[in-house]
Image (cartoon, rainbow, N blue to C red):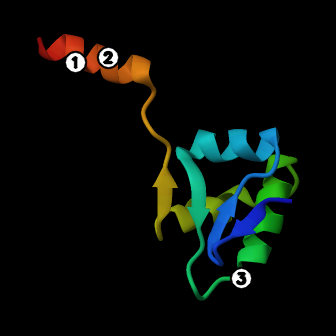
Amino acid sequence: MARVTSGRLVRPSNLAERRLLLSLGIIILHVPRRTNPYLIARRLERAARCEGADMALLRTLLGHGAMLAPASPAQSATQVDRRQ
């Protein structure tokens, strides 16, 4: 199951969960106060196993705040080349 750290941050605990969050464009999920972070961690685990319709819940949480994944160095290098 995903780890809950610092009270409201949910981090992936295995590769499947990490890939799922990266496919959504985030690395750490920040859970709002009105939502139980352990419930979200269980939903993340289920979504990583492709069970149920938990992806919709994760997408709605993205609107409330999440730490975005950094751009890869290859992408930023091509953007610099285009500017010159």
Q: Classify mark 1: residues with Cα within 10 Å, few (<14), some (14-19) or many (20+).
A: few
Q: Residue at x 85, y 57 (%)?
A: 46
Q: Classify mark 3: residues with Cα within 10 Å, few (<14), some (14-19) or many (20+).
A: few
Q: Are marks 3 and 2 in contact (CB under 8 Å)?
A: no
Point out residue 44 in the picture as x, y percentages from the top left corner.
76, 59
- Whichever of labels 3 and 2 marks the residue nearer the N terminus, that label is 3
| Residue assigned mark 2 | 77
Q: Residue furthest left?
A: 84
From mark 1 to mark 3, how far is it between C-alphas?
A: 42 Å
Residue 83 as seen in the image, left or right of residue 50:
left
Q: Residue furthest bottom?
A: 34
| Residue assigned mark 1 | 80
From mark 3 to mark 2, how far is it between C-alphas?
A: 40 Å
Q: Nearer the viewer, residue 43 or 38?
A: 38
Point out residue 5 in the picture as x, y percentages from the top left corner.
69, 69
Q: Are marks 2 and 1 in contact (CB under 8 Å)?
A: yes
Q: Which of the labelled discs sits on residue 36, or is there none?
A: 3
Say which element carries label 2: helix
